């Protein structure tokens, strides 16, 4: 990923977009919903910009191994478009649901107009911060942006027998958690209902299951970069096996 100025980007293809970036400590899978609370001026500006024309922004994850972007965290080169739903104000915060959509890869980054600053517990308004840069950078923004390329849908399918085995493994893992923690046994019945919802190995169901199972950085990044459905199925399986092994080790140590 290179760093470019907004004015230098021209002649976008049909699969290319310039979007705002919301950089967090985890990724969002397609079809996954996440409740968000925004209080920083940069992201308030971003939400105002995308809400006016009902546009998406990009949900990305900070990559600590990368050089910072004008003092801000640089993301991994993959992310998910987000549709903002049910946004409302609560005091000085903006609350909304982030709905994951299409995947994308980052081609170039556009750095924020201002470096980060510690404001303590009292944040300035968006207008106050804009006054610090608009004269010299009228097209600048408080948030990071990127030139991105949309990724195509996943290719292929999962064998129904393999998919059923994967769902059984997931059910076994959840039942182990229920037995270990002592939470309500009703969860087991809920899992049976969820298995019926996931009965067909569609792209939608594979993303839903990955959102519930895959919680490692490497796993999430690999899922979003995957080309084939079977790749994500393998990532889900390996993550479930890892979690089950961790439970077994915990039990052995506490016997």
Image (cartoon, rainbow, N blue to C red):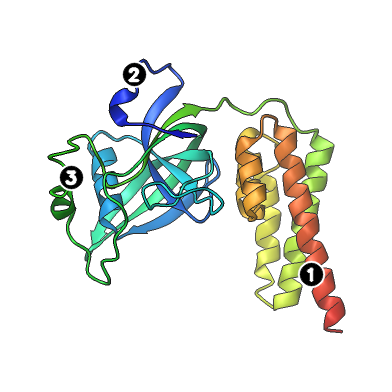
Quadrant including the C terminus = bottom right
Figure label count: 3
The kind of secondary structure element at disc 3 is: loop
Q: Earlier in the sequence, mark 2 or mark 1?
A: 2
Q: CA separation, marks 3 and 1?
A: 53 Å
The kind of secondary structure element at disc 2 is: loop
Q: Which residue is mark 1?
A: 247
The kind of secondary structure element at disc 1 is: helix
Which residue is the extreme one toward the bottom? 255
Q: From the top left corner, tell me how far across and down residue 53 is, in percent.
A: 25, 33
Residue plotted at (68% across, 57% down): 191
Query: Is disc 1 surrounded by few (<14), some (14 to 19) or many (20+) residues within 10 Å?
Result: some
Residue plotted at (83% across, 40% down): 162
Q: Is residue 217 above or below residue 31?
A: below
Residue toward you, 146 or 235: 146
Q: From the top left corner, tell me how far across and down residue 35 is, in percent.
A: 42, 56
Q: Is residue 126 above or below residue 189?
A: above
The reply to whether dot 3 and dot 1 touch (C-beta < 8 Å) is: no
Residue toward you, 26 or 136: 136
Query: Is disc 3 surrounded by few (<14), some (14 to 19) or many (20+) residues within 10 Å?
Result: some
Residue toward you, 68 or 125: 68
Q: Quadrant of residue 11?
A: top left
Q: Which residue is mark 2?
A: 10
Q: CA separation, marks 2 and 1?
A: 53 Å
Q: Nearer the viewer, mark 3 or mark 1?
A: 3
The reply to whether dot 3 and dot 2 touch (C-beta < 8 Å) is: no
Q: Earlier in the sequence, mark 3 or mark 2?
A: 2
Q: From the top left corner, tell me how far across and down residue 154 is, in percent.
A: 64, 29
Q: Which residue is mark 3?
A: 133
Q: Nearer the viewer, mark 3 or mark 2?
A: 3
């Amino acid at each position: 990923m290179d760093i470019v100025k907004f004015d230098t980007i021209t002649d976008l293809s049909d699969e290319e977009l310039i979007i705002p970036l919301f950089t967090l400590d985890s990724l969002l899978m397609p079809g996954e919903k996440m409740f968000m609370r925004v209080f920083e001026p940069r992201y308030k500006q971003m939400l105002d910009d995308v809400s006016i024309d009902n546009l998406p922004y990009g949900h990305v994850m900070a990559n600590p191994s990368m050089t910072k972007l004008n003092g801000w965290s640089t993301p991994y080169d993959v992310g998910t478009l987000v549709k903002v739903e049910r946004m409302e104000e609560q005091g000085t915060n903006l609350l909304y649901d982030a709905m994951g959509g299409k995947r994308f890869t980052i081609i170039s980054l556009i750095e924020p107009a201002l470096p980060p600053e510690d404001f303590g517990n009292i944040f300035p308004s968006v207008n106050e911060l804009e006054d610090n840069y608009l004269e010299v950078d009228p097209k600048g923004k408080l948030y990071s942006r990127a030139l991105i390329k949309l990724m195509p849908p996943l290719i292929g399918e999962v064998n129904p027998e393999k998919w059923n085995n994967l769902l059984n493994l997931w059910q076994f893992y959840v039942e182990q958690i229920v037995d270990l923690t002592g939470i309500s046994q009703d969860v087991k019945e809920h899992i049976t209902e969820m298995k019926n919802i996931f009965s067909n190995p569609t792209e939608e169901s594979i993303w839903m299951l990955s959102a519930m199972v895959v919680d490692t950085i490497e796993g999430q990044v690999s899922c979003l970069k995957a080309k084939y459905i079977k790749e994500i199925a393998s990532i889900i399986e390996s993550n479930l096996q890892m979690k089950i092994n961790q439970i077994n080790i915990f039990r052995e140590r506490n016997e």
